[in-house]
Image (cartoon, helix red, strand yellow):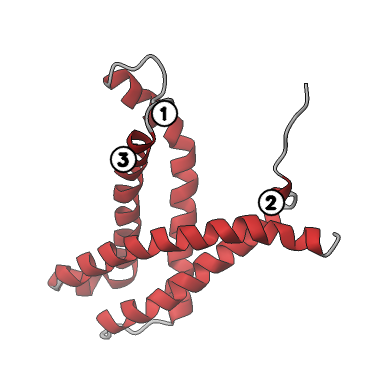
């Protein structure tokens, strides 16, 4: 039996490092908007970006480990014999978004409460704005990070390492 391996992920740790760097840079750039919304407590954008990247990385790791369990529960509740991975593509997209969107919103609220809790208590609208726009930014950064993961791992291949 022959095992197939994606050649583009020859060096997955290099790709992961590039993906994390892209996410950190994007979160730090978005921190400029966060800083403008919470001008009462100015923080360095690199600190905000770093905290958000750490929260997102931990949230994603937890989600990856919990996804099979959630998939099993959804399958049993929906009357499926197995996990609903054999269904239509649209079902899988909706299933993915139904799980990931609330997690992302909670991640952004965790960032907001950990850094700006006293301000958000008085003006929760600012927090919701950052949480919703930040969730959209996170999905856009996921696309860029995916390309960083794949092409970042190829950097070492091109250099012959």
Residue in the picture at 20% in, 70% down = 120
Q: Position of residue 98 (x, y in %)?
A: 29, 42
Reply above or below: 70 against 148: above
Q: Nearer the viewer, mark 3 or mark 2?
A: 3
Secondary structure at numbered mark 3: helix
Residue in the picture at 31% in, 40% down = 94
Structural distance between the alpha carbons of marks 1 and 3: 17 Å
Label 1 close to label 3 by CB (< 8 Å): no
Structural distance between the alpha carbons of marks 3 and 2: 28 Å
**Picture disc at residue 13:** none
N-terminal of the pair, mark 1 or mark 2, is 2
Image side of residue 96 versus residue 24, left or right: left
Front one among 80 and 43 = 80
Q: Is residue 89 visible?
A: yes
Reply above or below: 153 against 28: above
Residue 96 quadrant? top left
Q: Position of residue 119 (x, y in %)?
A: 21, 75
Residue in the picture at 43% in, 35% down = 67
Secondary structure at numbered mark 1: helix
Image side of residue 93 versus residue 117, left or right: right
Secondary structure at numbered mark 2: helix
Image side of residue 116 versus residue 71, left or right: left
Q: Position of residue 142 (x, y in %)?
A: 47, 58
Front one among 147 and 111 = 147
Q: Residues within 10 Å of mark 2 (few under 14, many from 20)?
A: some
Q: Nearer the viewer, mark 1 or mark 3?
A: 3
Q: Residues within 10 Å of mark 3 (few under 14, many from 20)?
A: few
**Picture disc at residue 69:** 1
Q: Quadrant of the N terminus?
A: top right
N-terminal of the pair, mark 1 or mark 3, is 1
**Picture disc at residue 12:** 2
Query: Which residue is labeled 3 in the image?
Result: 94
């Amino acid at each position: 039996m022959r095992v197939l391996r994606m050649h583009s992920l020859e060096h997955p740790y290099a790709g992961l490092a590039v993906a994390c760097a892209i996410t950190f840079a994007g979160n730090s750039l978005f921190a400029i908007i966060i800083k403008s919304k919470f001008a009462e407590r100015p923080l360095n954008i690199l600190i905000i970006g770093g905290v958000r990247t750490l929260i997102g990385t931990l949230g994603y790791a937890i989600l990856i480990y919990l996804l099979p369990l959630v998939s099993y529960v959804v399958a049993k509740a929906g009357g499926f014999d197995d996990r609903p991975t054999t269904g239509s593509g649209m079902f899988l997209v909706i299933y993915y978004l139904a799980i990931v969107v609330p997690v992302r919103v909670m991640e952004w609220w965790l960032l907001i409460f950990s850094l700006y809790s006293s301000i958000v208590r008085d003006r929760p609208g600012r927090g919701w704005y950052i949480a919703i726009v930040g969730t959209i930014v996170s999905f856009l950064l996921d696309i860029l990070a995916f390309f960083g993961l794949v092409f970042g791992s190829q950097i070492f291949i091109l250099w012959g390492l």
